[in-house]
Every structure is written in structure tokens, then in C-alpha cells.
């Protein structure tokens, strides 16, 4: 006897996932179906491994196929899980595997201090680049305070693992997105040591199906400690964008950031001054430089790196961020959105200059294999 795909799918639609109260076909849990004469092979992708349902689903599938189609049917079921292994597994896990495509440029967004708007700049830079029709990836490596998923309106979503056991990045606003926060418990991250971070970052980036990416923007953890240094040395970076606020203390920390990148030969593409000034909504032509004017420009000159632009303090920036709608998309007319576009353009110029002047970023394995 021979059976058909339709008959198989029909039969399998009688297998119900009790946790979600729908059948496995509607839940799109059946993959790689292969029907060949009286042989049927497929994979059931469950949400979590080791639940009662995950442990029984293969047998349930076999039973409905035998009962509804033919007892002689040869049924080969593989059960796979959507859930990504949590930290320990990632760290202990295997080597990186082959991916096609490639990441052309990687830009780290860094700051000497937390709270200066590093994530805000990373997100809006990524969105602005995507609006200029580049293929963009946004990677949150801030294991202590992963905020990119929230700012992109993707909180609580987890990437899935595809049939080749690669992580499929999430997608939003035309950007491919991943956060180390998906895999690392921030509370455990506090005690991480360099080698753990290296392993996690390598695997995190290497086991991802990125496809072709023009610009990968990485939100680094704030500061210039071991963790930052490790990440910077692990990922082949095209360059870094430093974010600072105008206060002297933030600028002093930005200088430390610049020194860190110098030490590892990563060019600083430029400095962004965030929360540079305030314009009252009813007096939009006024600019109040609350913390002093021109500090970041001066620092840029001193360090001999480009100044990429100043972003004002605007209420919509924070509000839209909190709502998961980056201001570049949701308030394109705002001063800050325009500033972010300018910053994106200058960053592109600096990357092009850098690539023209120096060897292209080394095609380090983690992003290419
Ligand atoms: N230009 C800005 N105007 C108003 N609020 C801002 C601006 N930049 C950042 N913020 C807000 O400041 C807070 C810290 O920004 P965030 O990007 O999370 O900083 P970091 O990643 O450096 O810790 C967030 O609530 C953010 O919405
Ligand atoms: Mg942040």
C-alpha cells in the first residue's frame, strides 16, 4: 500500500497538544515530512523538551497513523524542541557549525557608563540603517541589562532553532534581532568569567542563521571591564561607536572606552553625544545645553576620532522606547530621529573609509562558519 501527504497530515491533526489545546498540524509542529510509499518520516517540534506531552507525542503520532491509515505503515518520528538550551548547555555545547551568508560589518555600540543611552543609540542606529535599505542585524550582548528586546517590542519572545539546529534570529521592523538575554540569566551573568563569556558569545553568534547582513549593530554591556574586553576580542569588529552624555564624568569614561578599543586595534568610528541639549516643546528653536556644550566634540577632537552627532533629550525618545517603538520609526520628524539618521549616515561613511583604508574586518570564524 502507499499513502499520501494529505492522508498523513489529516491523521496527524488528531494529535492534540493538551497544553495549547490545538492539534499539532495547526500548531505547525510537524516539519520535514517525507512520505514515500508506506514509509513516513517527520519531526515534531515541541515547545519544551521533557514534558509529558513531549515524551508521548511520538507514540501518539504512530498510533493515529496506524489506526487511521494502515497498521503496516513504517513511521519514523523525531521529536525536537524549540526551546534553546539555557546557559550551561550553551557553554558546554558543541563547536560552531556551517552557515551560509555573511556579516559584512560589525559595529559595537559602547559606553563607559550605563544609563547614557547606549541601547537607545544602538536600536535607533539599527533602525535608521534598515530604513536606508541595508540588511541589518541587532545583537544585544548586554548580559547584565538586556534591554534591546523591550525597546524593539519583542519582550518575552524567544528565537527558535531550525532544522539545521541553528538559531533563527527574531525579526522586527526589518531587522534581525537576538539578545544574549534570551539565553543567559542576568542574575547568573554577574558571576561570569572571561572564558565563559567567550564561549557563550562564540556559540551565541556562531550558531545563528544570519543570512546576508550589511551591518550588525552590537549593544555592548556598559563599562570597560573584563567582560567588555572579552566580547570585543571575541567578535571581529569593524569599529565602535562610543556614546556619552555631556557630563565630564561620562566623557572621562568614554575616553576609557576609546582606550580599550585602541588596545585591541578596533577603530573608533566616532562619538555620539546623547542627551546633548533640551528644547522646550513650546520653544523648539531654543536649545538648552544643560550639562555644558561641546564636551563630546572636544573629546572627539582630542582623540582624533569623528564626531557623529548630538541627540537631544526628548520625552518621546524614552516613551517610544518603553513602548517598543524606536523613535526613528515612530516619530520620524522629531529632532532625535533626524539626529539618529545623520549618525547612521556618518557611521556608514566611517565604515566605508575604514574598510578602504585598512584590511577588511577579518572573516573570523564565528560569523562565517
Ligand atoms: N535622547 C534621549 N532623550 C530622552 N530619554 C532618553 C534619551 N536617550 C536615552 N533615554 C532614556 O534613558 C534611559 C537610559 O537609556 P538606555 O539606552 O537604556 O541607556 P544604556 O543602554 O546606556 O544603559 C532609558 O529610559 C531611555 O529611554
Ligand atoms: Mg542598555
Image: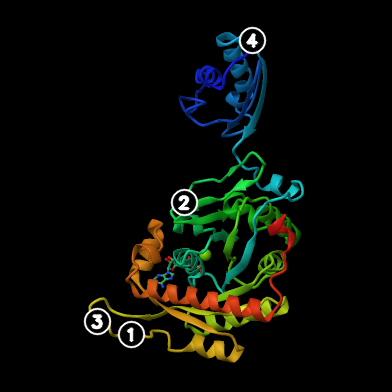
Mark sitting earlier along the chain (2/1): 2
Residue at numbered disc 3: 283
Query: Does residue 241 appear in this view?
Result: yes
Which residue is under mark 1? Answer: 287
Q: Is residue 130 above or below residue 360?
A: above
Q: Identify the mark at residue 1; answer none if there is no mark.
A: 4
Tell how many labels: 4
Q: CA distance from mark 2 to mark 4?
A: 48 Å
Question: Residue at the left extreme?
Answer: 282
Whether ligand 2 has any atom under 8 Å from the Cβ at mark 4 is answered as no
Q: Residues within 10 Å of mark 2 (few under 14, many from 20)?
A: some
Q: In front of the other: label 3 or label 4?
A: 4
* The residue carrying mark 2 has its beta carbon less than 8 Å from ligand 2: no
Q: Which residue is painted at 56% across and 22% down in the image?
A: 5
Of labels 3 and 4, earlier in sequence is: 4
Helix or strand or loop: what does disc 2 sit on?
loop
Q: Position of residue 295 (x, y in %)?
A: 49, 88
Q: Position of residue 288 (x, y in %)?
A: 34, 85
Q: Residues within 10 Å of mark 4 (few under 14, many from 20)?
A: few
Sooner in the amino-acid sequence: mark 4 or mark 1: 4
Label 4: which secondary element: loop
Check disc 2 and report the residue beneath it.
Answer: 154
User: How far apart are labels 3 and 2 at the CA level?
Assistant: 35 Å
Separation of disc 1 and disc 3 at Cα?
A: 9 Å
Amino acid at each position: 500500500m502507499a499513502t499520501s501527504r494529505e492522508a498523513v497530515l489529516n491523521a496527524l491533526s488528531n494529535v492534540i497538544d493538551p497544553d495549547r489545546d490545538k492539534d499539532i498540524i495547526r500548531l505547525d509542529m510537524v516539519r520535514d515530512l517525507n512520505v514515500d510509499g508506506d514509509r513516513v518520516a517527520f519531526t515534531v517540534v515541541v515547545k519544551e523538551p521533557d514534558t509529558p506531552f513531549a515524551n508521548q507525542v511520538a507514540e501518539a503520532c504512530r498510533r493515529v497513523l496506524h489506526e487511521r491509515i494502515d497498521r503496516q505503515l513504517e513511521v519514523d518520528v523525531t521529536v525536537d524542541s524549540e526551546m534553546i538550551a539555557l546557559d550551561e548547555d550553551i557553554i558546554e555545547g558543541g563547536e560552531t557549525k556551517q552557515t551560509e551568508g555573511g556579516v559584512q560589518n560589525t559595529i559595537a555600540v559602547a559606553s563607559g557608563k550605563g544609563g547614557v543611552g547606549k541601547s537607545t543609540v544602538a536600536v535607533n542606529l539599527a533602525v535608521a540603517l534598515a530604513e536606508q535599505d541595508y540588511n541589518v542585524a541587532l545583537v544585544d550582548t548586554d548580559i547584565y541589562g538586556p534591554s534591546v528586546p523591550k525597546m524593539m517590542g519583542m519582550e518575552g519572545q524567544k528565537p527558535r532553532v531550525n532544522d539545521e539546529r541553528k538559531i533563527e534570529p527574531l525579526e522586527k521592523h526589518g531587522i534581525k534581532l537576538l539578545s544574549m538575554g534570551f539565553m543567559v540569566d542576568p542574575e547568573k551573568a554577574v558571576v561570569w568569567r572571561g572564558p565563559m563569556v567567550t564561549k557563550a558569545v562564540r556559540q551565541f553568534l556562531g550558531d545563528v542563521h544570519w543570512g546576508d547582513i550589511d551591518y550588525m549593530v552590537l549593544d555592548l554591556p556598559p563599562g570597560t571591564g573584563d567582560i567588555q574586553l572579552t566580547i570585543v576580542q571575541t567578535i571581529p569588529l569593524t569599529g565602535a561607536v562610543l556614546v556619552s552624555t555631556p557630563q565630564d564624568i561620562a566623557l572621562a569614561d568614554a575616553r576609557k572606552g576609546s582606550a580599550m578599543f585602541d588596545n585591541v586595534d578596533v577603530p573608533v568610528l566616532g562619538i555620539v553625544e546623547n542627551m546633548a541639549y533640551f528644547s522646550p516643546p513650546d520653544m523648539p528653536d531654543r536649545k538648552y545645553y544643560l550639562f555644558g556644550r561641546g564636551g563630546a566634540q572636544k573629546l572627539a577632537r582630542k582623540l582624533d576620532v569623528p564626531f557623529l552627532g548630538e541627540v537631544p533629550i526628548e520625552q518621546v525618545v524614552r516613551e517610544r522606547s518603553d513602548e517598543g517603538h524606536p523613535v526613528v520609526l515612530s516619530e520620524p520628524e522629531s529632532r532625535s530621529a533626524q539626529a539618529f539618521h545623520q549618525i547612521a549616515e556618518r557611521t556608514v561613511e566611517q565604515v566605508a573609509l575604514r574598510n578602504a583604508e585598512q584590511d577588511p574586518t577579518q572573516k573570523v570564524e564565528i560569523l562565517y562558519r
